[in-house]
Image (spheres, rainbow, N blue to C red):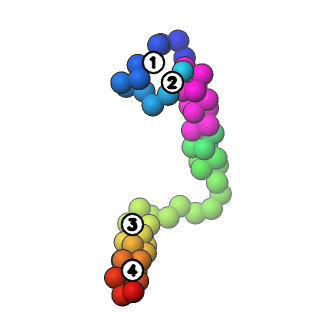
Amino acid sequence: MSAELSLIVSDFETPEQAASYDRWFRAQVQSSMDDPRPNIPHEQVMAEMRALIESKLNKNSAG
């Protein structure tokens, strides 16, 4: 990474931190792409998360 980072634009204090995060992020993406398990449709994940949030909200308001 040769460009100087602006703290206004970047969450990283140094180019080394940005490069380290970039390597980590790319490894996470590659790991996900290489995962042989079947994909889960976005709509299914969102429905499950909405149900989970709703159950937590109901549990908290009941007590």
Do the numbered discs 3 and 1 sit on residues whose CB atoms are within 8 Å?
A: no
Q: Is tag 2's residue or tag 3's residue first in the polypeptide sequence?
A: 2
Q: Position of residue 32 (x, y in %)?
A: 59, 50
Q: Position of residue 6 (x, y in %)?
A: 41, 19
Q: Main secondary structure of the magenta part?
A: helix
Q: Residue at x 61, y 29 (%)?
A: 20
- Local crowd size for mark 2, using a 10 Å CA cut-off: few (<14), some (14–19), many (≥20): few
Residue under label 4, please give it: 60
Separation of disc 1 and disc 2 at Cα? 8 Å
Residue 17 among those drawn in magenta? yes
Residue under label 1, please give it: 5
- Local crowd size for mark 4, using a 10 Å CA cut-off: few (<14), some (14–19), many (≥20): few
Residue under label 3, please give it: 46
Separation of disc 1 and disc 4 at Cα? 43 Å
Farthest front residue? 63
The image quadrant of residue 44 is bottom left
Depth-wise, is mark 2 or mark 3 nearer the camera? 2
Q: Horizontally, is 59 left or right of 36 in the view? A: left
Q: Residue at x 59, y 48 (%)?
A: 33
- The amino acid type of the residue labelled 4 equals Asn
Residue segment shown in magenta? 15-26
- The amino acid type of the residue labelled 2 equals Glu
Do the numbered discs 1 and 2 sit on residues whose CB atoms are within 8 Å?
A: yes
Depth-wise, is mark 3 or mark 1 nearer the camera? 1
Could you tell me which secondary element the residue under label 2 belongs to?
Answer: loop
- Local crowd size for mark 1, using a 10 Å CA cut-off: few (<14), some (14–19), many (≥20): some
Could you tell me which secondary element the residue under label 4 belongs to?
Answer: helix
Could you tell me which secondary element the residue under label 1 belongs to?
Answer: loop
Separation of disc 2 and disc 3 at Cα? 34 Å
Separation of disc 3 and disc 1 at Cα? 35 Å
Q: Is tag 4's residue or tag 3's residue first in the polypeptide sequence?
A: 3
Circle on res. 13 = 2
